[in-house]
Image: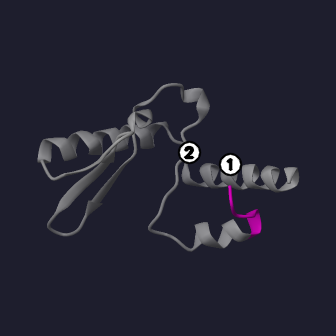
């Protein structure tokens, strides 16, 4: 973590369009370990950006987008709720600050 807890609080709480959900280690292997992805959409278009160790790919193919959306929903189901994720991040940041 690069921010102190005092610096993180306003950053996290002033971004209502961003939700962070922590998938606990106790979950074990899950589909999020396969690589990073982002889903972007507006009123008329939806695309997915996926990363592998050596390349990033933009996909506009509806079945691919549907598969990634399902992956996202699966991860969201495994993640801690928003408040619990926020509290865990703050707790770890405080522990990190104390260790410096």
- Earlier in the chain: of badge 2 and badge 1, it is 2
| Residue position for label 1 | 88
- Tell me the number on the disc at residue 22: 2
Up/down of 10 relative to 91, above or below = below
Q: Are marks 2 and 1 in contact (CB under 8 Å)?
A: yes
* Secondary element at image label 1: helix
Are there few (<14), some (14-19), or many (20+) residues within 10 Å of tag 2? some
Looking at the image, how many numbered discs can be counted on the residues? Answer: 2
Chief secondary structure of the magenta portion: loop
Q: Name the foreground residue: 59 vs 56.
A: 56
Residue 5 x %, y % = 75, 63
Residue 13 x %, y % = 60, 69
Residue 67: image quadrant is top left
Magenta stretch bounds:
1-6
Q: Is residue 54 magenta?
A: no
- Tell me the number on the disc at residue 12: none
Residue at screen point 31% across, 47% down:
50
Q: Is residue 4 magenta?
A: yes
Residue 17 x %, y % = 44, 68
Disc 2/disc 1 C-alpha distance (Å): 8 Å
Are there few (<14), some (14-19), or many (20+) residues within 10 Å of tag 1? some
Q: Where, quadrant-wise, is the C terminus in this rendering?
A: bottom right
Q: Residue furthest top?
A: 28
Q: Residue furthest front?
A: 54
Residue 70 x %, y % = 29, 40
Q: Name the foreground residue: 50 vs 85.
A: 50
């Amino acid at each position: 973590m690069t921010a102190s807890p005092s610096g993180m609080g306003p950053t996290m709480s002033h971004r209502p369009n961003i939700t962070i959900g922590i998938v606990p280690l106790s979950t074990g292997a899950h589909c999020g370990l396969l690589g990073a992805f982002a889903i972007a959409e507006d009123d008329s278009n939806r695309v997915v950006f996926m990363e592998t160790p050596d390349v990033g790919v933009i996909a506009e193919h509806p079945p691919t987008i549907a598969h990634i959306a399902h992956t996202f929903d699966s991860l969201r189901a495994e993640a801690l709720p928003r408040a619990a994720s926020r509290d865990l991040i703050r707790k770890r940041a405080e522990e990190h600050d104390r260790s410096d």
